[in-house]
Amino acid sequence: MLLKVKRLTVISTLFFLVLTSSVARNGEENKGRRYFFGGNFGLQFGSITNIEVSPIAGYRLFPWFSVAAGPKYQLYGENYAGFKFSTHIYGGRTFARIMVIGDFDKFIPLGFHGGLFAHTEYEALSLERQYFDLTGSEGRFWLKSVLIGGGISQPLSDRASANIMLLWNLNETANTLYNNPILRFGINF
């Protein structure tokens, strides 16, 4: 099952890159526009259910450097051999992003106008202790994560772009929600 999910992820990513490169426009992404919005939306169903909504609002300080922040909410549940729970996870995140390559086509003229970026992020999430702290106590605690990595930004139109990121959690603990590396998909407009 896990192998099928990995294959589907790789095939979907390749399909996504080929499809979006056909609608990419020539020129610099979001030229002259400083504010941007977007975020991530995720769905996972099965023995683990995870529904995530994570909008962002950002500002391009320079054409090559942007910052953004936004709230994050997850409905998370597990169902393993009689152990069943559901909980709400909420918090926020902020990030900075540096465009290393703005347009691949300017370096290698293959018709792919995506860009390469470096990404650093701080995320703080409120979790229920009884499910994530393993001490058995009640209440909530804040899980703080520092994520670094990079990704590819593919223009979809003159205002929208899709992002694929590969991130690492620098302070991974037993309470961490995701294992390294972390693969994320998002859209900005």
Image: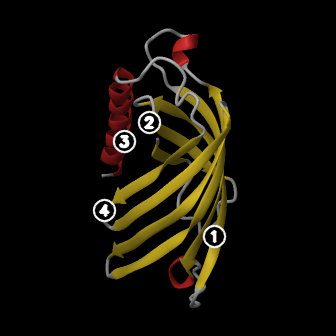
Residue at point 41%, 71% (across, down): 76
Residue 120 visible in rendering: no
Q: Mark on residue 143?
A: 1
Looking at the image, residue 104 sits to the left or right of residue 66; the answer is left
Residue at which label 3 appears: 9
Identified by mark 1, the residue type is Leu
Identified by mark 2, the residue type is Ala
Residue at which label 2 appears: 160
Horizontal and vertical percent for residue 14?
37, 30
Q: Residue furthest top?
A: 109
Asked if marks 4 and 3 touch (Cβ < 8 Å), the reply is no
Q: Residue 8's image quarter? A: top left
Residue at point 43%, 60% (across, down): 53
When the figure is inspected, residue 106 is found, relative to residue 141, above or below; the finding is above
Looking at the image, residue 105 sits to the left or right of residue 168; the answer is left
Residue at point 47%, 67% (across, down): 73
Q: Mark on residue 45?
A: 4
